[in-house]
Image (cartoon, grey):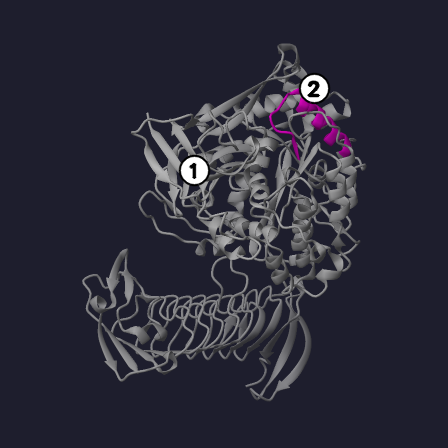
Amino acid sequence: MTELLVKNACVIDPIRGINGDIMDIAIRDGRIVESVSDRAEVIDAQRCLTLPGGIDSHTHVCGTKVNFGRYMSPEDMRAGRTQRRGRMHVTSGYYVPTTFGNSYRYSAMGYTTLLEGAMAPLEARHTHEEFTATPHQDMMANTLFDGNWAVMDAVREKNVKKAAAIVGWTLNAVKGYGIKLTNPGGTEAWGWGEDLTSIREPVPHFEVTPAEIITTMIRANELLKLPHSVHLHCNNLGKPGNYQTTLDTFDLVPDLNPDRQTLYATHVQFHAYGGGTWRNICSKTEEITRSVNSKPQIVMDMGQIMFCRTMTMTADGPMEFNLHCLHHNKWSNHDVELETGSGIIPVTYSKKSAVNCIMWAIGLELALLTKSPWQCLLETDNPNGAPFVKYPEVIGLLMSKRYRDEECATLHADTEGRTSLWALEREMDWHDIAVMTRAGQAKALGIINQGKGHLGIGAEADIAIYPIRTDSVDPAREYRKVVEGFQKTSYTIKRGRVVSRDGEIIVDGANTTFWVNARIPEDLRVDNDPEFIRRFQEYYTVRMSNYPVQDLYLPRGRRVDTEAFT
Amino acid sequence: MRVILESKVRKKPTLPIEAEAIIPRNFLKGTDLLVYEGNKERKLSELFWIFVEGTAVSPENIEVVLKGDTSRIKRVGEYMDTGSILISRDIGMHCGNFMSGGTIEILGNADAWLGREMRGGTILCRGNAGHYCATGYRGEKKGMQGGKVEVFGNTGDFCAEYLAGGEVHVHGSTGDFPGVEMRGGQLIIEGDVTRPCANMKDGTCVILGRVHEMIPTFEKIDRRVLPEWKITADVYKGDVANRGKGMLMIKNPGEV
């Protein structure tokens, strides 16, 4: 029995409605309890900001495409090198660090749970292997279904139940957590050398439109009672004028679930562009946020970019190819048979580029114009917009108008006229930030029941104590202190153990991988469907019996059961 | 101020020394520097006899002189920004990495990666240089961006790969693929080359010697006199396979 007592903590726990109360937190065997015995180890938080462990609801840290990013950028491995020290492995890399690098840096920032944004089902083994090597965070994997042939067949037949059964079987087979749609239909079209420009355009050879895929998958998701909603990377990412596609997509979404959103739209910054070319690109965040503000069924995340060198990686192959045509740098495209694809290219976001400056402003506008922080979560689509180590700076920008003004003054001259950031006075408070970095994520991912994202009795004892005194720091003026405070926790506690102290990792760590098992009635299961089996054997290069990920790959997997079709 | 470092005889003379600490600025505060020999951290004084002559108030007046067997010492002059380094014999790999100012003079030969990703300053190599002289490191798309590298002997393969700025002047010959992926700057080779400037995007390359295995994707546009070199040169534009805006000038082989 291990016991720990965190004393004098200034707790902000939005899920339980606690905002800045000074309290003690008792922990026994990795869970939060009423009280502990006198023998418990004591940490004095000294009235510093104490939050539930951070949750990243969309990041790319594990899997084949992240690893391909590592292959592609040996130059990045020169950055961020740290030596082996105590329990810490060597690390290297800045925007695509080693798995341990990711884990340690997230841990130092107080993050304890991550959702890998996109896992190709066929390449799930690699993702799970890297999960085990990211020891300080509990992991979940969103599974890609954007170009899944079997799903598209079901969509064409307008058979939601069949689509749900395929999704349920696949999630179970690859130990995935939720449905990810990346440029639905578009990536598959790209596999045939074609591209889609709207959500009403049919995917060649499949005769389904992205809009049909999205609506069917939303219903299938609810039929399966998955904890997370459909996680959507909209079509037309990064194209000037794409906001109309985004709005059209949002209009498709019904409100089907009282507990959480029905659609999670990710990195919306890349989907909120007006204009028609790169020369007249402008911000359309007002239209986007107006739509989101009126639709509680939608949660989005920022996809903030920050000015630095980074790597873009996504299952959106055609978009990456278009980006390559702009940059003429190294690039890669990859097709995952019958499922999806991906693309990877390095980019540098620069203040000299008007487009980059506008993108930067759009991300912040989205957060500031969305009324409820529960509906716009903070992330950079790591590493696409910026490596996650930039989160503290994003927090600083959201909390301080002065910081934003100082940054704005250094931007390209064309930015002001094409964005509305200059006019936004809103400054977020500590509570908003707590929502945008953990509570909102826990709710959106449906892991509150798993004891994540709050500090109530019975919750997992994932706690981040930041060296910030909320009573004496004025974030509007002293934003530097805020940024520094969020960069390095005094203590990061993961399942009741202190894993990181002042940025130094002190234990080996042992994470959990959450995955979803939707129980599907026998007569609907696709593994009993001879037609599904026949097509699987005919088209895949792997046998159906070899396709599922063995339990061996999840040494500490935690199954989340749902009763589908009930 | 002059700091003379004379290498001591080592038990295992082939073990590489990682000496990025040897830059003039660091000697302003004394000679208490650390370097790695293999995987062991060593004090500078364990590996060198150190002699200091005179004093200096600013790093630009510091000259570091390396004597003895220095052929296994790597990364000398890394991130150097001022002052000067004189190496009296051969030097190991990665000499002058990321250098932005000052002068390095090598009286012997230099090993591979001489002046890689240099930003400014001058490197003079009186002997030969190894492969990847004045280039970018693996994956880096902008190699040398400024300054000057002058090699009086020959260089190995991939000389000035990814050259983006500054000047590289080789008095001797180079190996295979000099100036490959060039995107700026100036490359002058007085000796012979094979397959020069493949996939060049921009910049200028002048070759006074013979070219073997010329890349076919260069377009001959002119023949002109280069008064600077007192030659008539064939002028090529290329590499047309890659939006070629580069200029490759090769001495007319008919000329003696």
The mark total stands at 2
- Image quadrant holding the C terminus of chain A, namely top right
Residue located 25% across and 80% down the image? B52
The vertical placement of B192 against A471, above or below, is: below
Residue A219 seen in the figure: yes
Give the number of the disc on residue A162. Answer: 2
- Label 2 or label 1, whichever lies nearer to me, is 1
Label 2 crowd bin: few (<14), some (14–19), many (20+), radius 10 Å: many
Residue marked by disc 1: A136
Indicate the position of residue A5 as horizontal and vertical percent values.
37, 33
Indicate the position of residue B89 as horizontal and vertical percent values.
30, 76
Residue type indicated by callout 2: Lys
From which residue to which does the magenta span run?
A211-231
Residue A293: name its quadrant.
top right
For the residue pair B248 and A217, the one nearer the viewer reads as: A217
Residue A547 seen in the figure: no
Indicate the position of residue A155 as horizontal and vertical percent values.
74, 26
Q: Does A344 sit left or right of A139 as displayed?
A: right
Instruction: Read off the chain for label 2.
Output: A
Predominant SS of the magenta segment = helix
Residue A214: name its quadrant.
top right
Is residue A421 one of those drawn in magenta? no
SS at circle 2: helix
